[in-house]
Image (spheres, helix red, strand yellow):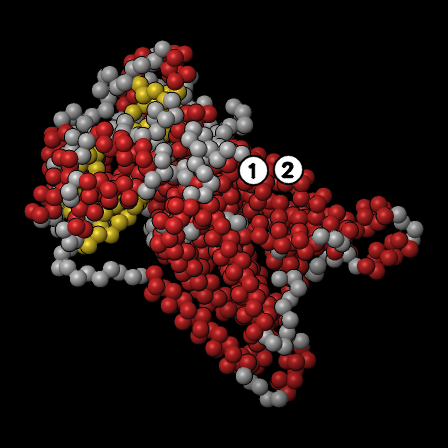
Amino acid sequence: MLATGVVGAVEDPWIRWSWISGHVDVITAALLQHIQLTLIAVVLGLVVAVPLGLVAWRSRVFRGPIFTLTGILYTIPSLALFAFLLPFTGLTTLTAEIGLVSYTLLILVRNIVVGLNSVPDDVREAARGMGFRPLAELARVDIPLAIPAIMAGVRIATVTTIGLVTVTALIGEGGLGSLIYTGLLRDFHTPLVVGTVLSVALAVVADLSLSGLQRLVTPWARSRAVA
Amino acid sequence: MNFIGQVVQWFLEPAHWQGDGGIPHRTLEHLAMSGISVLVAALIALPIGITIGHLGKGGNLAINISNIGRAVPSFALLVLAAQFFGIAAASQVVGFGAVPAFVALVALAIPPMVTNSYIGMREVDADVREAARGMGMRARAVLLRVELPIALPLIMAGVRTSAVNVVATATLAAVVAWGGLGRFIVDGLGLQDYPMLFAGAVMVAVLSLIVEFSLAGVQRLATPAGLRPSKSIQKEESSGAALDTAAVAA
Amino acid sequence: MRLKRITVLGASMVALSLVITSCGSTGGPSSSAKATIRIASFNFSESIILAHIYGGALKNKGYTITYRDGLGNREIVEPSLENGLIDLYAGYAATDLNFIDKRQGTALEAGTDAAANVAKINSRLSSKGVKALDPSPAVDQNAFAVTKAEADQNHLAKLSDLTPSVASGWTLGGPPECPQRPFCAPGLESTYGLKFKAFKSLDTGGPLTFAALKQGAINIGLVFSSDGGITANNFVVLEDDKHLQQADNIVPLIRTDVLNSEITTLLNSIDAKLNTPDLTALNKSADVDKQDPTDLAATWVKDHGF
C-alpha cells in the first residue's frame, strides 16, 4: 500500500533511515523517559499495593471495597483518568504518575492476595508451631511463598504500564509516545514506526527479564502457567 | 463558583445536549463504534480461538502472537491506522476518522478474545470430553453441547475485556479526528476548558463502568450453574485468570 | 536467606529507579554567567522553527537555552509566559493582542498596523513583566482554504464570493479554539455574514485539517498563510478581501526579567531579516519534505550570520 499518510498527497516512506541515524539522541531520550516513567509507576504501585493487598487478604470487610475501588480505577480509560487529574495537578509528571500508578493497583493487589492465599495452611501451621510471631511469619513465610504470584503481577503491571505511558504524550510527557505523537502531528511515518517498534520491544524485554528475575528469586517454584 | 460547580454547570447547559456535538449524539457514536468493532472482532477472533482450542494445536503460536499484539500501545495502533488508511469517512453517515478508528479497535479487540477462548476450550477436562464421547456424542455434539458451554465463561471474559478496552480506546480515537465522548476530553485539553474536559472524563468513566458491569453480569449468566465460582478469593482468581491474558484498558 | 534475597531485590529495584531518574535530569553545565532562557513554541512546525532560530542565535551569544517545543496552543503558551513558566515565544501581533484583550476582559483592539498592535500588547502586559519586541515583516495569518474542485464549482476566489446561503450548508474545520477566536468563526460571521452548518474540531492547520479538506469531511478549513503544503495539496486560499485578518506579524514576546539590551538587539535584528517567502519555504521543507524544524532553524541562523 502506498505510504501516503493521513493526508494522502505526498509520499513518505515508512522508515527514513536518515532520520533515525540523525535523531539517535532524541530517540534515546524518549526511551529513557519511557523507562523512567514505567519504573516509577510500578515501584510506587507496589508500595501502595502491598499494604492494600495485606489488608484485603486479612480483612473480609475491606476486601470487597479494595477490589471494587482498584477495579474502577482500572476500568476508567487512561485519558479520562488523566483528565480527572489535570484541573488539580496540572500538565505535570505527577499527573502522569498518579494515573499510571492507579492502573497497576488492581493487578498488583489481586496478585498479592492470590499469592498470599496460595500459601498452604499446613505450612503456616508449621511456622506457628515453630514459634513464629505473626509478623515474622508474614515476612519469612507468607510473603516469600507469595512471590511467584506477586512477580507475575509485576510482570503484567509493567507491560501494561509500558503501553499506557504512550498516552501521556497528550499531557506533555510521553516517553516513546512523544515519537508517536510527533508522527501524528507532522503526518510523518518514521517517528511513529520507531516509537511503536521500541514500545513493543521494550515490553517484550521487560516481560522476559522479569520472568527471568522471577525464576531467580524463587528457585523452589516454577512460574505459574497462567501468567 | 468552585470547580465541581462549574462541571455541574456544564452538564446543565442545554446547548451541550443538542446537535452532532452534543452529549447524546457523542454517546451513541461511541457506543455504536465500540459495539460494532467488538462484534466484528468477535466474528474473527472467536472462531479462531475456539477452533485451535478444540483441536489443541497452534495454541502457543496464537498466544504468542496475541501477547505481541497486546504489547502494541493502542495510541500507536490508532495513529498507524490513520496513516495507513488515511483519515477517511466510510460514508457521510459514519463520519470522518471512522475508518482508522474502526480498524484499530477491531485489531485491539482480537487478541484477548483469541487467547481467552483458546484457554477456555483447553481447560475443558479431558475426562469430561472422554465421558461425552463415551456417551456416544459425535465430535460436533461434543463441541457444541459440552466444550462450548464449559468454555463459555472464559470466552465471555475475553469478550468483556475486549469490550472495555475498545470503549477506552475509542476515547483516544478523538485524537485522530474521530468523534465519540473522547471529543470532549481532547477539545477540553485544546481549549484549556477544564470543566468540559472533566465532564468528558466523567461520561467516559461512567460509560466504561456500565459496560464492564453489564458484561460481568452477562458473563455470570453465561456460566453454567454448576461452574459458578463461590463468593471467595477464588472468584477473583477465575476472573483474574482472564485478566492475566488480557490487554489493558488504554 | 529468602528474606535477604527479597531485601536485595527490593533495594536494587529502588536503586535502579533512582539511577534512571537521575539519568533523565541532566542539566547542561552552565559555564556562562548568562541567563537561562526557556523558549516555548506552539504545536506547529513554523513555531518550532522560529523558537529554534531565536534560541540558536541566543545560544551563539552564550545563553543557555531550554526548549518546550510544541507546548500547545495559545491557551497554554501565553499564560505560561505570564506565569513565568517560560521566558520567550514567537507570537503573532494581532492574534496575541486579541487573545490578551479577551483574557483581560477589554475590547478587542487588533488592527492592520503591526507596530500599533505591538504597542498595545506592551501596554497590556507591562504590569505582567512581559515585553513584545519589534515585529517582523514576516507574516503568518489565518487563511481559509477550499479544494480546487470546490473553488471551481462555486466560482470562488475571494471570501466575499462565498454567499451566506452556500455557507449555511457547509462545514468549517479548524483547531478547537476556532469558534472562539475573532479571526476565525466569529469573524467570518461578523465580517462576511457566513454562518456555517457545522464546525469540526481538527488541528492547527495541520494534517488532520488537510485530510478533512481532501476527503470532503469539511468544505472549508482554517490553514495558515505561510503553510508550505497548500499548493502541494491543490488547495485554494480564498482571499481575505474584507480584511478580517489583521496584521499578524511575527513578534517575540519575552519576560522582562531575562531581557537585556543585547537580547533586544539580537532578536530585533533577527525579526528584521525574517520574511514571508523564506518562512513559507522553511515550512514546506518541514511539513512536506519532513525535514527537522530544528535543523532548518540551525541552517537559517548560520546562513544569516547569527
In the picture, the quarter occupied by the N terminus of chain B is top left
Of badges 2 and 1, the one in the foreground is 1
Q: Residue at x 33, y 51 (%)?
A: A90
* Three-letter code for the amino acid on which mark 1 is drawn: Val
Q: Is B44 left or right of C118, judged from the image as shown?
A: right
Residue C110, picture quadrant: top left
Q: Is residue A205 visible?
A: yes
* Three-letter code for the amino acid on which mark 2 is drawn: Val
Q: Is B227 left or right of B195, judged from the image as shown?
A: right
- Circle 2 is placed at which residue position? B40
Marked residue chain, label 2: B
What x and y, as percent, mark residue C80?
A: 24, 46
- Circle 1 is placed at which residue position? B103
Judge whether A190 appears above or below C185 on screen. Answer: below
State how many labels appear: 2
Residue A125, picture quadrant: bottom right
Q: Rounded to the nearest whole Å, what is the CA distance between mark 2 and mark 1?
A: 10 Å
Asked whether the residues under marks 2 and 1 belong to the same chain, the reply is yes
Q: Are marks 2 and 1 in contact (CB under 8 Å)?
A: no
Judge whether C150 appears above or below B225 on screen. Answer: above
